[in-house]
Amino acid sequence: MKNAKVVIKHLFLLFLAAIWLVPILWLVVTAFSAYKGINISHFFPEEWSLDNFRQVLVEPDSVVQFGVWFKNTLIIAIFTCIISTLFVVMVSYAMSCMRFKGRKQIMNFAVILNMFPGPLLMIAIYFVMKSIGLTNSHIGMIIVYSAGSGLGYLIVKGFMDTMPVSLREAAKLEGASEAKIFVSVIIPLCKPIIVYQIISSFLVPWGDFVFAKLMLNSGNAKDWTVAIGLYNMLNKTLINRYFAVFCAGGLLVSIPIAILFVIMQKYYVAGITGGSVKG
């Protein structure tokens, strides 16, 4: 009976894995298809080709400008990653290692603000950015992605809470300032959680579509991010000529993230588990 339950459990997990993997496999094989549209008669292509990748990478046209989109997305993601990580780490240090009047009230207020869904704020943010001329601007995108990042400090703070107070006290006895303690003591010990924060901050603009579509609405393809550009290929007038190209682009977009996770996996897991010890 016990073995039967184990077999049933694993079969169920295998079924769920298949449901999750089949669409990804279909995207991959379609990317290598010689047929440009959606082929629903065969799961695997009858003819294989690298033309879709060549069109994405070296043969841009009025519809496919993947190189420009990739550059735009990479610039936004890198600057957002740097600014957001700095904000989160500094706020986390202040909340974890420093004691000042109103600290608990600020933390409670931050938790309440995080309860509000982001999409509810999009229209208000859009009109604020429009009033100051920062819609259809990559700088505006970076500002919006980075501005509220400091509120997401809880996991990093939880990691810092696990550090012995004696380390900071010893540094203070040696005459170190608060800034010196932060840079020379805390930051080196926080490498795993900083890696986690870097990856998390990078993924937000890299994969975002909804807010990018709202902000970058000029119709100029050279301003778009990868998500908007790929989505445009699914337009009903273009999908029969560009669906396989869309799949190739989607596959290429996933490669940098996959490489990043493979390289940083050890630190990423350590950061998550360490940050979940204390809140």
Image (cartoon, rainbow, N blue to C red):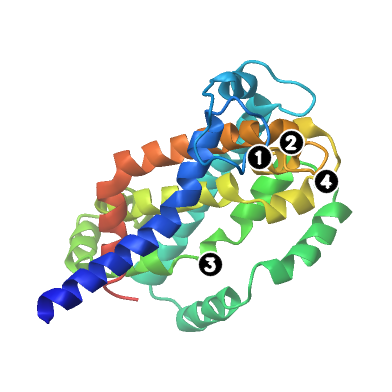
The answer to whether 40 appears left or right of 180 in the picture is right
Q: Residues within 10 Å of mark 1 (few under 14, many from 20)?
A: some
Where's residue 7, x and y in %?
A: 19, 69
Question: Which image quadrant for residue 15?
Answer: bottom left
Q: Amino acid at mark 1?
A: Ile
Using the numbered discs, state the Cα–Cα distance from disc 1 to disc 3 in whole angstroms: 43 Å
Q: Nearer the viewer, residue 234 or 74?
A: 234
Tag 1–tag 2 contact (CB < 8 Å): yes
Residue with the mark numbered 1: 38
Give the answer, above or below, for where 114 lies relative to 242.
below
Using the numbered discs, state the Cα–Cα distance from disc 2 to disc 3 in whole angstroms: 44 Å
Residue plotted at (76% across, 21% down): 61
Using the numbered discs, state the Cα–Cα distance from disc 4 to disc 2 in whole angstroms: 24 Å
Give the answer, above or below, for where 29 lies relative to 193.
above
Looking at the rendered image, the quarter that the C terminus falls into is: bottom left
Q: Amino acid at mark 2?
A: Asn
Residue plotted at (67% across, 39% down): 230
Where's residue 163, x and y in %?
A: 22, 65
Q: Earlier in the sequence, mark 1 or mark 3?
A: 1
Q: Residues within 10 Å of mark 4 (few under 14, many from 20)?
A: some
Give the structural element (helix, strand or loop) at label 3.
helix
Residue with the mark numbered 2: 240
**Mark seen at residue 217:** 4
Q: Earlier in the sequence, mark 3 or mark 4?
A: 3
Where's residue 62, x and y in %?
A: 80, 24
The answer to whether 227 appears left or right of 80 in the picture is right
Residue with the mark numbered 3: 151
Residue plotted at (49% across, 35% down): 29
